[in-house]
Image (cartoon, grey):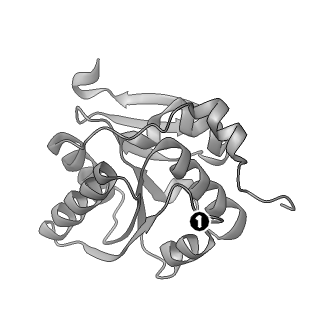
Amino acid sequence: MTLSPRLDDARVAAVAGAHIQPEPHTAEEIDQMVRLALARGAETVTIGHGDDPNSAAAAKAFATAWRNQGGLVFDTIEWSDAAASWMREARNLIRFYPDMYVLGGAPAGLAQMIRRLVWSTNWAAASTIGFGSAATPTMHQLAGIQYLDGLTGATAAGGTWRIQGAELTQIDPGRDA
């Protein structure tokens, strides 16, 4: 792709409005994410998250739960929602070639990071599990849902969601139904 993946601030503001922060994670969400990664045969993960407190806490909780299951966390990468390009963070996220990526953050920052991953690395959405914050229409619109095929994740209630064919589907809604 020849254009920069970075979205201009005016477009982000028009789609995302005020700076939306993700909700705090839940134990059910973390447990389901671990189950999803194990079901895919993952042994190693790299975790990426926005710099807001809820995303940092969710990343830490997942890392602890993953290690308690015998999994290995190669690295945890934090990015700023207001970064200039996200290039350094994107390269750090993929540098160890984990079995699975785990991502979460505020919709605007997460979308910017995903766009950088798509444009500049060999990252694939299908090798990624997202926190509930990755299942928002705002994030999908900003990132470009066409780049998210195969992205799967957990809801706060412990359900499962997946993006397939440019559509978000609740596979197992958990208590969200």
**Residue 126 visible:** yes
* Image side of residue 163 versus residue 133, left or right: right
Quarter of the image that includes the C terminus:
top left
Residue at 58%, 62% in the rendered image: 83
Q: Is residue 135 above or below residue 48?
A: above
Q: Position of residue 27 (x, y in %)?
A: 15, 44
Q: Is residue 53 above or below residue 92?
A: above
Asked which secondary structure carries label 1, the reply is loop
Location of residue 160 (image quadrant): top left
Q: Position of residue 162 (x, y in %)?
A: 46, 38
Residue sitting nearer the eye, 172 or 13: 13
Q: Is residue 92 above or below residue 52?
A: below
Location of residue 44 (image quadrant): bottom left
Quarter of the image that includes the N terminus:
bottom right
* Image side of residue 59 versus residue 17, left or right: left
Residue at 30%, 72% in the rendered image: 43
* Image side of residue 176 versus residue 150, left or right: left
Residue sitting nearer the eye, 83 or 163: 83
Residue at the far top: name it: 177
**Residue 166 visible:** no
Residue tagged by mark 1?
123
Residue at the far right: name it: 2
Residue at the far left: name it: 68
Q: Amino acid at mark 1?
A: Trp
Residue at the far bottom: name it: 96
Q: Position of residue 118 (x, y in %)?
A: 66, 60
Residue sitting nearer the eye, 123 or 114: 114
Decide: few, some or many residues near mark 1? Use Cα within 10 Å; few <14, some 14-19, many ≥20.
some
Residue at 41%, 65% in the rendered image: 100
Q: Position of residue 19 (x, y in %)?
A: 49, 39
Q: How many marks are shown on the rendered structure?
A: 1
